[in-house]
Image (spheres, coloured by chain):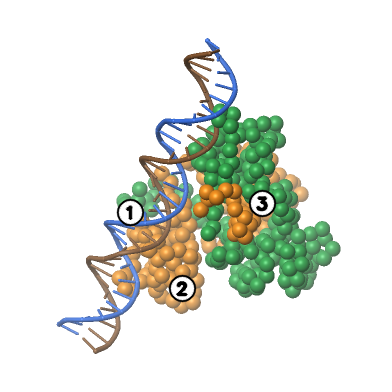
Chain colours: A orange, B green, C blue, D brown
Amino acid sequence: MKTQSAVVERLLKYRDVMQKMKGLGFVRVFSDNLADAVGVSPSLVRKDFSIFGLTGNKRGGYQIEELIVRLNVILGKDRKQKIIIIGCGKMGRALMSYNGFPRVGIRVAAGFDSDPAILDEAAPIPILHISKIKDFITEKEIQVAILAVPESSAQSIIDSLKKTCIKGVINFAPVSLRSSDNFLIQSINVEQEIENIFYQIHFAEGATPVAEDVL
Amino acid sequence: MKTQSAVVERLLKYRDVMQKMKGLGFVRVFSDNLADAVGVSPSLVRKDFSIFGLTGNKRGGYQIEELIVRLNVILGKDRKQKIIIIGCGKMGRALMSYNGFPRVGIRVAAGFDSDPAILDEAAPIPILHISKIKDFITEKEIQVAILAVPESSAQSIIDSLKKTCIKGVINFAPVSLRSSDNFLIQSINVEQEIENIFYQIHFAEGATPVAEDVL
DNA sequence: TCCTTTTTGTTATTTAATTCACATGTTTTT
DNA sequence: AAAAACATGTGAATTAAATAACAAAAAGGA
């Protein structure tokens, strides 16, 4: 039922690279170029394109301009992409002002928090009280939220979001929340990534993971 | 040469779940429990354990206490895990005070920035000038860094880090930096995750990715 | 015009990851 | 004590993902 998340992630990277190439004045690109830039094999680039019916020209490669347009349609960039941020602690506020979002056409519609001291309804991106979240989501038809709240409140917020038209969440709390078919949760766990890196480093230094049976 | 990152990520999750179960007073756990909690199949849990030589008891499941200890050795949690944060803008400072790090035994040794206005050498986690980074890394034997700088300076910082004893980096800048064998880079790209979610949502709503040949 | 070069698009192959299935050792029940 | 119920551990089977390979189309000489 769900399309491979990995393929879509690669499409996003291809588009990103092409956007930058376009900015440099390039007009066409070969699967080899994209492969080098993204760090995959050229045949995988072509296969990914083939899955989505994206075609180029034998010998001539791909027209960057045209391919970006077609990719944007596939990736839904022709629609408005509004999100809200729940939890306006340091991480939440850092995300609210993150300029990577506007650059790719993602608009932060508002932030929400339970602490009255940090509310600011008049700001360009307002910080509203959490009690107003349900109406806001309904009225503005928000579908995606970032959850940047303490671990303790993450689950209960998720439960209430499930009763709204929110369909997907990026979760920064270190709790294991599971996606279901109609409610996607993508967790970002920085400490886990770091622990993973420490493991890879240590293993690379020659420490056997455990036994001799690991290739 | 590199062990599957995915397996290690699962080990980290298993350990996390068991840590919480231990806190609740549980003494043993079955592969089914861990599977449910982490969202994988029981046989995968057992196979993951088997790869690393982690054993339990037929019928009796796994002893939580003992398994956590053995996992911590495998995952390198018996060593000090110090990191530095490069770039102390909003995101960098949010990460500096993130309490998820101390909770899992990761210590932020210092932050670094080029802006003299935000330096603070006396703070519990000092913010030092970027010019001091090389000596600091050498002296404190730092192996892992978080990169939270603007896109424009990411690549040049990576290049200079490669000349130090840093072996792994978590990158928050939206640039595609590639790992090599002795220098790991793990990028966290929130906007990409969001775009991916938007795609999944839209596709789930019935929009065909492109043609009829996609299963 | 014809030959050579290049690069796509797709099928076949290989490799990797996950699930299945069941024999084996343990505990509980009767 | 024997039987029944369980849960692990692992090799076999399956599924999924990535690479390799190559025929066919386009472009550029000679």
Residue A87 seen: no
Question: In the rendered structure, which disc, 3 or 1, sits on the residue that comes first in sequence?
Answer: 3
Could you tell me which chain the residue with mark 2 belongs to? Answer: A
Looking at the rendered structure, the kind of residue marked 3 is: Gly
Give whichever of A87, C12 is nearer the camera: C12
Residue drawn where x is 72% and y is 58% of the image? B82
Q: Position of residue A143 (x, y in %)?
A: 53, 48
Compared with residue A137, is residue B22 higher up or lower down, i.e. above or below? above
Could you tell me which chain the residue with mark 1 belongs to? Answer: B
Count of marks overlaid on the render: 3
Residue C23 falls left or right of residue B213: right
Q: Secondary structure at mark 1?
A: loop
Give whichever of A202, A82 is nearer the camera: A202
Which residue is tagged 1?
A: B211
Residue B60 falls left or right of residue A58: right
Looking at the rendered structure, the kind of residue marked 1 is: Ala
Q: Nearer the viewer, mark 3 or mark 1?
A: 3
Q: Are marks 3 and 1 on the same chain?
A: yes
Q: Secondary structure at mark 3?
A: loop
Q: Are marks 3 and 2 on the same chain?
A: no
Q: Residues within 10 Å of mark 2 (few under 14, many from 20)?
A: some
Which residue is tagged 3?
A: B76
Which residue is tagged 2?
A: A22
Residue at mark 2 to residue at mark 1: CA–CA distance: 27 Å
Could you tell me which chain the residue with mark 3 belongs to? Answer: B
